[in-house]
Amino acid sequence: MLIDGDVAVIDARGATLYAVRTRHRTLCSANMGSRARLMNDTLQTILEHAMHLGRAGRLTAAAELIQRELGWAAPRTAPSAATDTRSPLIDADFEATEPPATSASGQFLHGRYSHGNETRDYRLYRPAHLRTAPPLIVMLHGCQQDGEELARLTRCNQWADAQGCIVLYPSQSRLANPTGCWNWFAPEHQRADQGEAAVLAALTREIAARHGADPQRLYVAGLSAGGAMALNLVATHPGLFAAVAVHSGLPYGLAHDQLSALTLMHQGPSGGHVPLTLAENGVPIIVFQGDADLRVNPLNASWIIEQALNTADTLHQERETRRAAGGLDVTRTRYLTASGTACAELWMIHGGGHGWFGGDPAAAFAEPKGPDATEALLRFFLAEH
């Protein structure tokens, strides 16, 4: 059991600083018991510590504890000895492949953009050789990262050279969030007309217009908090993005403050109404999730898929499990329309933790033993949508 009843962080004057209502829930998969107990114990410890800090008058420390736990830190793992030398984006979905070698290096530009009261730095990669009206991919980093670190981790620039697309890496301001997390959980950032969703959408349009990107081929992807913010963008700006990729992220609209976000991360969704904004917008989606992730409960991935699919339509499912490079099994479920188009894909990496699958093993937050998520999302974006 996690916690039964109401949990609050209270200051020295008795005022409620943070509050959340939780209830005992039984996870649906029996083989997840030990992992679930560890996650629940961790969350209970965090909440109890935050309450003690609040009652002692250490409000800043309590807030920082919660903010820090919204971040994540995955251990660096040794690189897998297995590699795959097949051509990129051709039947290589389950392998952690090396990004293609390119003969010319593109431009990795710095920029700063302001919209309303929001200002964000960004990195922009332009390959040396671009076709007319290239695709634009927006990559949103996770906590304790910035755009440049995400570029290094995902090796998306090398793939962009081969595929001829522009890549935009916005960075969160540490003034907006000390741990570098996108504030995906706050209501003001879940709206089209204000906050981080508004500035990121405006930045996307500005970069697309300035660099001549195809307005029908704008894509967004994100890791962890960045994945949650990617869903915010898709939900609040219908028609802007042609497809979305969420890696170890959180469902849209199920958290409203830091503590409910932390509960969602560790416990998973608790039932009730599922916002169908994503399904109403009809944006194709690909989701990556490790089932041994101790930072984001894997149940969140299924809820993201449920949000994205229009339950009124009959979809054909194709499911297969294969061994990826490094020894991890991957179950890929594809949700197909009557015409055979994949409107959604769920990649569950068995034994995978909280990091970018197939990422650069020299970078922080890499899970190099899994399939190459960068290659897979580019295939989903560029070849199918």
Image (tube, rainbow, N blue to C red):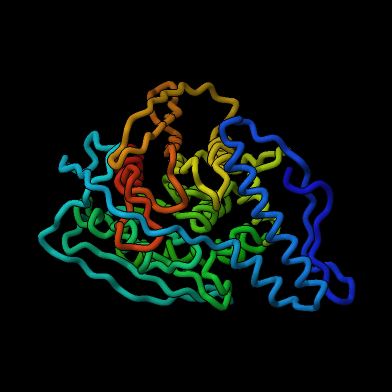
The part of the image, by quadrant, that contains residue 54 is bottom right
Measured as percent of width and height from the top left, residue 83 is found at: 20, 45
Give 232 or 254, whichever is nearer the viewer: 254
Horizontal and vertical percent for residue 220? 43, 53
Q: Quadrant of residue 304?
A: top right
Residue 109, quarter of the rendered image:
bottom left
Image position of 108 (left or right of 230): left
In this rendering, position of residue 287 left or right of residue 313: left
Q: Position of residue 353 (x, y in %)?
A: 46, 48
Residue 240 or residue 267, whichever sits in front: 267
Is residue 317 shown left or right of residue 274? left
Figure quadrant of the C terminus: top left
At 57% from the left edge and 43% from the top edge, which residue is drawn? 35
> Is residue 224 placed above or below 196 in the rendered structure?
above
Where, quadrant-wise, is the N terminus in this rendering?
top right
Q: Is residue 15 above or below residue 90?
A: below
Task: Work out which residue is located at the far left of the displayed protein and give it.
Answer: 103
How many discs appear? 0
Q: Residue at x 79, y 60 (%)?
A: 19
Which residue is more in the foreground, 164 or 228? 228
Q: Is residue 80 visible?
A: yes
The percent position of residue 82, horizontal first and vertical second, equals: 22, 43
Looking at this view, name the residue that lies furthest to the right: 14
Residue 244 shows up from this direction: no
Residue 212 higher or lower than 227, as above or below: below
Q: Residue at x 49, y 70 (%)?
A: 172
